[in-house]
Amino acid sequence: MKYELKDEYIELYKLIKVLDLVDSGAEAKMIIADGHVRRNGEVELRKRAKIIRGDVIEIADVTIEVI
């Protein structure tokens, strides 16, 4: 899946919410805190990590390319 970035960056939990991978921002924050999200191959625990163009986010079997 590809996500086209409109601004300089998007916060990680907002990206997950915008793509409807979760029902709420709180749920997005929970899966990040539980270590289920990888950013460029490494576990990302910062809910407000600034996701920029070129980042690859993995959540379970979903891969998101930020363009």
Image: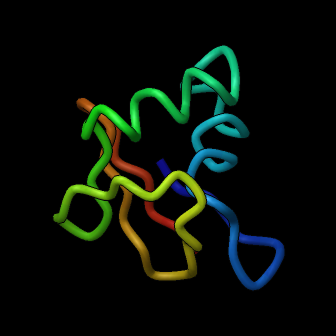
On screen, residue 28 versus residue 30, left or right, reads: right
Colour pattern: rainbow
53 in relation to 19, above or below? below
At a point 22% along the width and 56% down the height, the residue shown is 43
Q: Give the camera-side residue of 48 and 22.
A: 48
Q: Position of residue 13 (x, y in %)?
A: 60, 45
Pick out the residue farthest to the left: 41
On screen, residue 22 versus residue 38, left or right, reads: right
44 in relation to 25, above or below? below
Q: Is the C terminus in the top left, top right, bottom left or bottom right quadrant?
A: bottom right
Q: Position of residue 42 (x, y in %)?
A: 18, 64
On screen, residue 40 versus residue 1, left or right, reads: left
State how many labels appear: 0
67 in relation to 35, above or below? below
At a point 67% along the width and 34% down the height, the residue shown is 17
44 in relation to 26, above or below? below
Pick out the residue farthest to the right: 6
Q: Position of residue 52 (x, y in %)?
A: 57, 79
Q: Position of residue 51 (x, y in %)?
A: 55, 71
At a point 44% along the width and 63% down the height, the residue shown is 65
On screen, residue 39 versus residue 17, left or right, reads: left
